[in-house]
Image (cartoon, grey):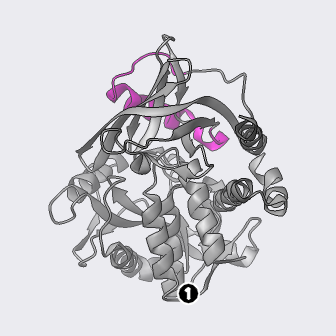
Amino acid sequence: MYLNENLLKRVVEGTAFLGSGGGGKMESGFTFIREILNFTDQVEMLTFPLTEVDKKRTACIVCDMGSITAFDPKQDEALCFAFESLSGHFCNELGKIDAVFPIETGPENTMAPFLLAAKYKIPVIDGDGAGRAVPVLMLSTFAAGQVKNWRPIAISNGLGDSMLVSASDLSKVESVLRETTHTSLFSNSSSLALWPDEVGRIADKCVQGSISMALHCGQLLRGIRIKDGALIAGALAHVNQLEGFLIGKGKVIYKTSDEKGAFNFTTTKIEQVDGTIITIMSQNESLIAFQSNLNYPIAIAPDSICYLKSDFYPCTNAEIGIPAEDLQTEELYLIGVKANDKLLTEKILAGFKTIINELGFAGNTDIPHTNSRPLGDLFLDLAEAAALS
């Protein structure tokens, strides 16, 4: 399958919704598309099921690390430096790296491997480590599946200041990478290349089809916006493979944003028409939501907490304005998407719980979703209700 400019833009829009508020800004994803077009007008993506030949390729995972609001003007070059550094280190052992995976779902980090694919004329594999964005590497399905060559990890900025990072366990590697990213030399934004292995072994650990899902999600939202029945019909069945639930709808009345340790922490409050307040807390990604008249969370990771504007354009946490700066705050739908089964392992659930505890919540994280339904149908019902109002 080959993705041209229009299809890549649909992927960015789909990942902006499915990324649970994280994975990079939408503008970062569109910037990567403009840079991709300097190399080629279409990029190859290998979809599942993979051929036996493609399973034998050598691939690695690539991503950008840092605050969701940070983006190196030379982020494309940072990715190349990191990729070449990792490739050089493992060339004798593994040979040429000739395929790439994204680490997660999000506008910047889903597009990152496409940039490398365009430059080095290699394919992207249609899968990532979460089907959403995640705050730390250890929460990816790649890490939980115990990738083979987990160290070293290559890190670089856009000037080519790069290094290979290794430690006794992955959490320590993550800590070194975060601290490095937070230095003035990197300014809260770095690029990583990591975990090279045969495509078949990596693919067994990933959320397969995650990029195609984002593509269809972006297509469905576009079809709804422009009232194109063919676009809707072509995407609906795919998006309906996901289960979604409406968390609430309202206007942003409050937002704080704090850069700390190469993360962007936000607290966002949305007032609904009945006067209740929904509060969403994020560490790059939205992780937990509360409602003012209830004494328990209404949504919590690993389920995704996603934003959709009233005009059915998606947005990330980075695009939500602070009300004092944006007096024209529009209504947002807050929509939950149930986590992929590969995120429901004991190790990943415990990791999310630890991070949520650090945000200040130590209560029950098991929330039933009796109102969940196929996500595409939910989009269409919201669009129909909006048209009638």
Q: How many marks?
A: 1
Q: Is residue 218 above or below residue 239?
A: below
How far across and how far down the image is residue 388, in percent?
76, 36
How far across and how far down the image is residue 273, in percent?
56, 23
Looking at the rendered image, the quarter that the C terminus falls into is: top right
Q: Residue at x 31, y 76 (%)?
A: 74
Determine whether, in the image, residue 183 is placed left or right of residue 68: left
Q: Which portion, as a residue range, is magenta? A: 339-365
Q: Of residues 283 and 69, which is closer to you in this image?
A: 69
Determine whether, in the image, residue 212 is placed left or right of residue 111: right
How far across and how far down the image is residue 37, in percent?
52, 84
Is residue 55 visible in the rendered image? The answer is: yes
Q: Residue at x 65, y 31 (%)?
A: 246
| SS under mark 1 | loop
Which residue corresponds to mark 1? 121
Looking at the rendered image, the quarter that the N terminus falls into is: bottom right
Residue 217 placement: quadrant: bottom right
Q: Residue at x 71, y 60 (%)?
A: 219
How far across and how far down the image is residue 192, in percent?
37, 65
Q: Residue furthest left?
A: 184
Q: Is residue 363 magenta?
A: yes
Q: Residue at x 58, y 37 (%)?
A: 333
What crowding class fits label 1: few (fewer than 14 Cα within 10 Å), some (14-19), or many (20 or more)? some
Q: Is residue 145 magenta?
A: no
Determine whether, in the image, residue 295 is placed left or right of residue 3: left
